[in-house]
Image (cartoon, rainbow, N blue to C red):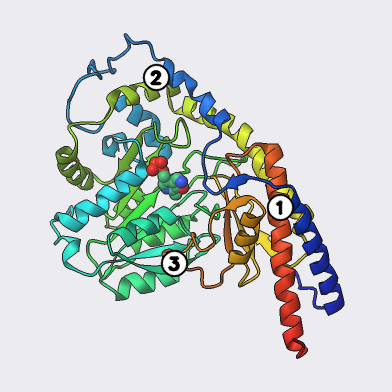
Amino acid sequence: MPTLCDDSAALTARLDQARHDYAALKAQKLSLDLTRGKPSPAQLDMAGGLLDLPAHQYRAADGTDCRNYGPPGKGLRELREIFAPVLRVPVEQLVAVGNSSLELMHDCLVHLLLGRGPEGERRWADRKVAFLAPVPGYDRHFALCERFGIEMLPVPMTPDGPDMTAVEDLVRSDPRVKGIWCVPKYSNPDGTCYSEETVRRLAAMETAAPDFRVFWDNAYAVHHLTDEEVEVADILAACAEAGHPDRAFVFGSTSKITMAGAGVAFFGSSPANVDWWLSYAGKRTIGPDKLNQLRHARFLGDTDGLRAHMRRHREILRPKFDTVLRVFARELDGSGLATWSHPKGGYFITLNVLQGCAREVVRLAKEAGIAVTPAGATHPYRDDPQDSVIRIGPTYPETAELERIAQGVAVCVRLAGYGKLVDQSRTRQGVG
Ligand code: PMP
């Protein structure tokens, strides 16, 4: 962060200005929401063609009548072929199933807790289990761990992915550590893309637990915001090369491609892990919604069609991200009160405010009618020890609304930040 202004008269003047701006903000009686990363109605409209599949088109390429049960297996091949290259999973090792990747992560945990692992390991429920949680991270990953009593050990994120030295130390020394959450591309919330070196080290590292698993949640595989369409190294190939072919579970979905909650999810892994998955999944459901899979395959056409569709998403999303970044730059650059990420893809901007200010910023915003994701949500147990990380989800609101939201958040950052600095300056001077 830039140097803080420590001239106390100047600080007090800035605090007064922030108080004035905050009063004006409250007077607008806003009611705005940027809590969750949801696609906007305009993005959903772009997938409207999904709902127009003619009633007589119900046969998959292999002749399967998608209106009926069966055959058991991995889901429609034509859909898996579209997603295999972007998820970097060979088509034979990719399963299309369900409508939510989170559901598949949940189920993997349940199967590992209650059943034998892919290599016949003992069930996890009989022992203490811990997961590494790179921070900042995705709150719903953390909620799954809490749900199942899996202890979370935070590891810091770096610009290349999780701090691999910390990760390697923990997995080498502690057999309770059975897994790590990874959002490898345009991560939620800080937009990080894992470097090749990070992927290689995750695949190769020695783990005290023989059944260690990388939960590779590739939720933003095709969600680019710039011309630079970032590629992340192939985790399944890296694991196989390193002699740990069964280490990674890959997840993805069309939630932020077609319709959130009405899409298709994917699970990919080694051939042994896919067999393991299917043996349990076949008990849970007779089969996936093949009509929806067929609709998706027809609508997207092929992998190029998927990429073209995502470029149209980008046309909607890029101005929204630009608006927030432009307003933050205008309102906060040089203040020393905040830094923020400049993601090349994904759904979020991370705003880092002065230590001890995030909760206060979120509280002030709420009081002014702007709902922001609760501070702490980006950390296990909702505990951000620095109280400094705020997740901004600019995808849903209209661009004009975002201008007001970002400006409002910036006012709250200034009020909380200058308030803190004035307090600190008074304490230093023995005042108050
Ligand atoms: N993983 C990440 C990293 C996400 O950001 C999200 C959506 N917020 C999900 C998974 C949820 O995806 P799905 O709708 O497929 O369950």
What whole-number distance in Å separates the C-alpha atoms at marks 3 and 2?
Answer: 41 Å
For image coordinates 72% across by 86% down, the residue present is: 427
Report which residue position mark 2 lands on.
Answer: 298
**Does residue 89 show up?**
yes
Instruction: Identify the mark at residue 408; answer none if there is no mark.
Output: 1
Q: CA distance from mark 1 to mark 2?
A: 43 Å
In the image shown, does 207 or 174 lie closer to the viewer? 174
Residue 196 versus residue 252: which sits nearer the camera? 252
Is the residue 278 above or below the residue 67 in the image? below
Q: Position of residue 37 (x, y in %)?
A: 52, 45
- The nearer-to-camera label among 1 and 2 is 1
- What residue is at 33 percent from the left and 26 percent from the top? 293
CA distance for labels 3 and 1: 37 Å
| Circle 2: element type | helix
Is 312 left, or right, of 96 in this rendering? right
Looking at the rendered structure, the secondary structure element under dot 3 is helix
Give coordinates of residue 242: x percent, y percent.
31, 58
Q: Earlier in the sequence, mark 3 or mark 1?
A: 3
Judge from the rendering whether residue 184 lies leftward or rightward of residue 391; answer left or right.
left
Say whether mark 2 is within 8 Å of ligand 1.
no
Q: Is mark 1 within 8 Å of ligand 1?
A: no
The disc label shown at residue 164, or none: 3
Rendered position, 324 above or below 357: above
Circle 1 crowding by C-alpha within 10 Å: few under 14, some 14–19, many from 20: many
Would you identify the image quadrant in which residue 51 lies? top left
> What amino acid is at disc 1?
Gly
Type of residue at label 2? Arg
In which quarter of the view is residue 98 placed? top left
